Image (spheres, grey):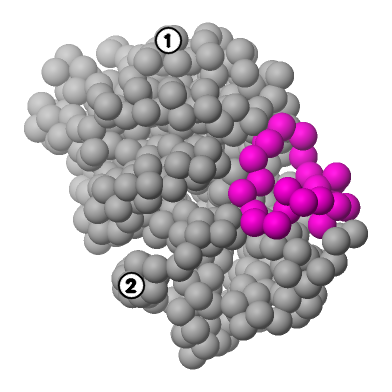
Amino acid sequence: MLSDRYDLGLSTASPVARDAYVVGCDLVLSANPGGMAAFDRAIAADPGFALAYASKARLQQVGGDMPGARATLAAGAAVGGTLSPREASHMAFHTLLLAGHNDAAVAAAKAHLRDWPRDAMVLSPCSSVFGLIGFSGRPGREQEQVALLDSVADAYGDDWWFNAQHAFALVETGQRDAARPKIERAVVQNPRNANASHIRAHVYYEDGEAEASRRYLADWLTSYSPDGALHGHLSWHLALCALEAGDTEAAFALYQSAFAPPVAKGGYPLLPMVDAVSFLWRAELAGHPRDPARWQALHDFAHTMFPHAAIAYADTHVALADAVMGDGAGLEARLREMADLQAASRLPSGPVVPALARGFAAFLRQDYDAAIAAIAPVCAEHERIGGSRAQRDLVEFTLLKAYVMAGRNDDVSAMLRARRAGPRGIPVAGVLAH
């Protein structure tokens, strides 16, 4: 029987199909373009190769083509024939994943990985801050991520993809000393792994090494395709480094050329939207003037791509764009939708996003005490909105700025003392005086 790179048997007798599938999986795991074409080659070489359909469907889902994803997975189920127990379980996981049954998919993945821990194409959708656990809205989801990866670490050994993903989970839980050697090993093992480069940027961020991160990313991005799924997001990381260094011109040049919608390429519009909102807001908190035209374009894009409440991470940033643009009607409509979801037990992040939305609105109307009253009680729970610690610093920076503007200097000092060790740059105007 033919097998994949992780020595898992495949129900195809075609070496061409197997090779194309392995290439496609590695392109997905390294966040490089070309995965869809590779899976199409695998399907063309063996139209009965079910797992190639599942992986293609997952890429379509991530790219926002849900009708195409469902059709592809259905085609794979129809032609798959007799599958091994591992492949049948693999397909069952993807069926739950594409149906949007995220909690059930996580449970199925954990059960699957107990028997087949090296099935990276099942583990991958559950890993990273953008995965099923990362966006689950559950308290403690960062520790849940570490526990899952710890449980399969022995099975992967010294694997380039796993080393990077494990490092991400570790650094997001404050285990910086454990994360550093893993990510350094991963970037040596596969220097063109965009996921590893992304995670290395997070390790740099959490260790307060903005200049080292800037040098690394500026060089690495020169040979990464703009069509790569992480090109825009890595450019966002680079822009934050420039902003922290006071190089405003370079930071905004990256915004305009690399990650402002609709310039950013490579996948689902979630990252371009949140990166752009986050960058513009962080620039304002640092003291740079607002560009209303940029915000208007971003607000329109956000409402086009995410017209209704659904994903906590998206809703947080859409709410911020609404607050900046004074779109009270849009903000209230989203708050009503979130209230309906919560009443139906379909808002996993609970009260965190509605509170942040109200806090942003209060901040923008310069009612800083009201902003503090809304944001401070949920600030310790902001992991529930999803995203990384670096991305969620937007919440902490907003609260810090509200304290500064309200003249609550003792609260500024207390928050700075309580802030996690590592990140040094706090680009919030007025904070350095404390």
Callout in the foreground (2, 1): 2
Tell which residue pokes out farthest to the bottom in this image: 329
- Which residue is found at the position 37% from the left and 15% from the top? 191
Q: Tell me which segment is drawn in magenta.
A: 412-434
Question: For this view, does 308 lie left or right of residue 226?
Answer: right
Give 429 or 315, whichever is nearer the viewer.
429
Residue density around tag 1, few if under 14, some if 14–19, many if 20 or more, within 10 Å: some
On the image, the x and y values in percent for residue 115 come to 56, 25
Q: Earlier in the sequence, mark 2 or mark 1?
A: 1
Question: For this view, does 56 lie left or right of residue 149?
Answer: left
Report if residue 265 lies within the magenta region.
no
- Which residue is found at the position 32% from the left and 38% from the top? 231
Task: Label 1: state its secondary structure.
Answer: helix
Residue 385 found in image quarter: bottom right
On the image, the x and y values in percent for residue 149 come to 62, 28
- Which residue is found at the position 75% from the left and 64% from the top? 404
Amino acid type at mark 1: Gln
Give 180 or 87, whichever is nearer the viewer.
180
Query: Residue 293, which numbered label?
Result: 2
Position of 148 relative to 158 (above/below): below
Image quarter hosting the N terminus: top left
Q: Is residue 297 visible?
A: yes
Report if residue 433 lies within the magenta region.
yes
Tell which residue pokes out farthest to the left in this image: 44
Label 1 sits on residue = 189
Query: Residue 123, which numbered label?
Result: none
On the image, the x and y values in percent for residue 354 come to 64, 74
Task: Label 2: state its secondary structure.
Answer: helix
